[in-house]
Image (cartoon, grey):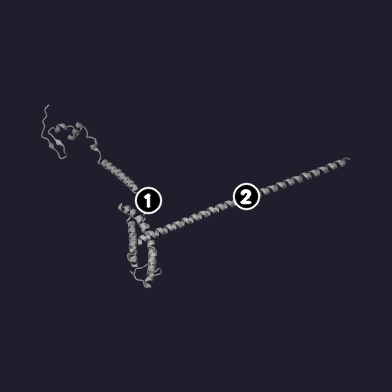
Amino acid sequence: MSTEYAEAEINPDGTTNTGAGDDFNEGGGNGTEGTEEEFGSAPTGPESLDPAYYVVGIFFALLALAGLIYFMRRKRRRDRGFDDADELFSSLDGKEFNLKVPEEADEYYEVKGECEASGWEPGQGNANASPDGPGRRLAQALMKRCIADVPLLQFMQRESPGMNRLYSQSMCSVKQWRSFQIAEQLVTAEVDEVRAEADEIEPGWSQVIWRQAFQYHTMLKNRQEAEKKAMLAMAERKRVEEEKAAAIKNKADSERKRIEDAEKAAQELLQMEAREKNSKSSFSGKSDSMKKGFLNKKK
């Protein structure tokens, strides 16, 4: 068999034509059909998968990785003292930062106005010179104001670390963060203002006034707690004494009732015996009269 092969020609669709193409496609088919029948269909291995399957697989892999990162960060927060981020977020609600300066601040300025009217001037010093002097009175009013400010400082010191952590992790709203900043600025301004007033009353007092205020606040708090405990202990002793007195009274009432019931039962028993005795005697008298009447009638 001899076959003449013409020079191959490449068509625009990628197929080739040879000189024997007419003989090969006598059945009315094209060249590609004959090729597919001879060599089989296209491969059906991994190369033939739809790219959408790869996209879905990558998506689930990223989702699993994100979940793993989330649980690792949550565990790390628990190890650092955060039992639950949601609890921390709810405990630092923005409404909690609507702080106000205590009324002792207004009272201080009222006292200051009265002292200035009586001749006191800032920077005179010697606040402890006269117990009844304006300087002494103004110093007491400022210390009272400073002690009333201590709970504000303690609140901000307690809440500030948690709020800063929430902000660094983008877990608080803008409104909440602004509310916290306003409260922080309010407390900072109050601290600075108290220090300035302290230096006007007694130069250098600003260096120790806040330490003194914290000490006085702790002392007053301990005294209040001791008084509260004493009142609770007194109430408990009173309750125990009342219960003891009530128990004694109940016991005496029970004993008295027992005696009364016993006496009443004894009286009822005596009355019952008397009734039975009377009943027997009356029955015996009737029997004797009936016997005598019968004997007399028989005679």
Looking at numbered disc 2 in the image, what kind of residue is underneath it? Glu
Q: CA distance from mark 1 to mark 2?
A: 60 Å
Marks 1/2 in contact by CB < 8 Å: the verdict is no
Residue 30 seen in render: no
Residue 104: give x, y in percent of width and height: 39, 64
Q: Which residue of the protein is positioned furthest toward the front in this rendering?
A: 129
Residue 282 is drawn in which quadrant?
top right
Give the number of marks.
2
State the residue at coordinates (19%, 32%): 39
Q: Quadrant of the C terminus?
A: top right
- Mark 1 neighbour class, 10 Å CA radius: few under 14, some 14 to 19, many 20 or more: few
Q: Position of residue 126 (x, y in %)?
A: 35, 68
State whether residue 244 appears in this view.
Answer: yes
Question: Which residue sits at x=45%, y=56%?
Answer: 226
Q: Residue furthest top?
A: 1
Task: Tell me where residue 203 appears, x and y as whole percent.
Answer: 32, 66
Nearest the eye: 183 or 90: 183
Label 1 amino acid? Glu
Mark 2 lies on residue: 255
Instruction: Tell me the number on the disc at residue 87.
Output: 1
Residue 201 higher or lower than 218, as above or below: below
Q: Secondary structure at mark 2?
A: helix
243 is higher (above) or lower (below) than 65? below
Q: Quadrant of residue 58?
A: top left
Q: Nearer the viewer, residue 204 or 42?
A: 204
Q: Nearer the viewer, residue 138 or 128?
A: 128
Nearer-N-terminus badge (1/2) = 1
Per the image, label 1 sits on a secondary structure element best described as helix
